[in-house]
Image (cartoon, rainbow, N blue to C red):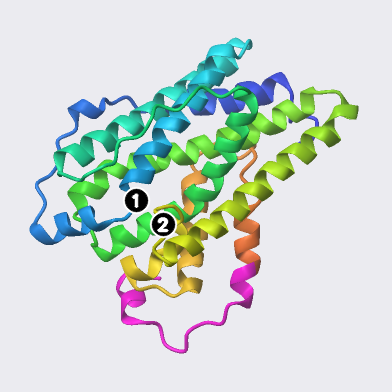
Amino acid sequence: MRSWIGSEDHKAAFCRAFVDTHKRFEPDSICWPELDPQSLSRLKSLPIWNEAVRTEAATALEVQSLGRVEPDPLLAEAISLQGYEEGRHAALLSLLTRHYGIAVEPFETPAPPVDPKWAFVRTGYGECIDSFFAFGLFAVGVRSGYFPVALTDIFDPILQEEARHVLFIVNWAAYLRARIRPAARPLFDARRAWTVAGLLADHVRQAIRFRSGGSQEGFTMATHSEVGGLSARSFLTLCLEENDRRLALYDPRLLRPSLVAPLVRTAVRFIPSSRGAPAAERSIGV
């Protein structure tokens, strides 16, 4: 396996896995469902829209910037396609907020990154963290009926796109590391570790600030109890199950994200179980 990582076969496998599973659709073609007053109120009350729209626009620019300068044709194809998908996410959120009358604060168009490669590393590993918790939170919303099926059906493919994105980033990073000189790998590892440590620290701070009402960031890590009434242990277990389920669709030879899920598996062992499963947990099958 180690000798395969960094090979041309490895590059072909993770690039083709990404490109060949791309789903074609245009945000303008989406028929937004009519929501009942309660569902519309829930949608509007989600404290995420300013941050979500801004973040998706910035992410699209960062990924597209790397796609334009990547010299390898196959990598450029896959990265550019991911940039297109990120731009589609931004467009979809813009259309959703406009359709349902959700106010979004204006923001300045971000500047292109100075170092596209490391901007992609930071963006990609940030998605690894965000997606892990988003998979679980989305499953809570679906199972609990927090939003109507007609709306969650629109977003399920978007969550699956995120699974493809995180699969690509970890294999791309491993491929890059294997292709550089052995003497340069410790510096690459140190810079990547520093980036990931900074992201983890940011996410913890954002979750704390979100809980105190000071930020829209940290939503996916801090709202499981509000959406589904789940305990922390049940929510983390569901995140693990959903993460495994969504990534299981792809070539088993490819690397999977190996930071958040192992940490959570360890943490779950030390979180005591509730004596009796809350009614909310029983109702959604956790």
Residue 94 belongs to magenta span:
no
In this picture, residue 135 sits left or right of residue 272: left
Kind of residue at disc 2: Phe
- The residue pinned by badge 2 equals 219
Instruction: Tell me the residue at 63%/77% (across/down).
Output: 270
Q: Does the magenta stretch include residue 269?
A: yes
**Type of amino acid under label 1:** Ile
As rendered, which of 68 and 113 lies closer to the eye?
A: 113
Q: Which residue is drawn at 67% across and 26% down?
A: 10
Q: Position of residue 129 (x, y in %)?
A: 55, 49
- The quadrant holding residue 256 is top right
Q: Is residue 156 left or right of residue 273?
A: left
Magenta stretch bounds = 267-286
Residue 222 visible to the viewer: yes
Q: How many marks?
A: 2
Q: Residue at 78% across / 23% down in the picture?
A: 179
Left or right of residue 270, residue 112 in this image: left
Please, what secondary structure does the residue beneath circle 1 have? Answer: loop
Taking the spot 71% from the left edge, 33% from the top edge, the residue there is: 174
Report which residue position mark 1 lands on.
48
Helix, strand or loop at mark 2: helix
Image quarter (top left, top right, bottom left or bottom right) of the N terminus: top right
Above or below 82: residue 67: above
> How far from the left and from the top, in percent, is residue 151?
21, 47
Residue 221 in the image, given as x and y percentages of width and height: 47, 60
x, y (%) of residue 97?
22, 41
Q: Are marks 1 and 2 in contact (CB under 8 Å)?
A: yes
In this view, the residue in front, 3 or 167, is 167
- Horizontal side of 139 relative to 170 (left or right) equals left
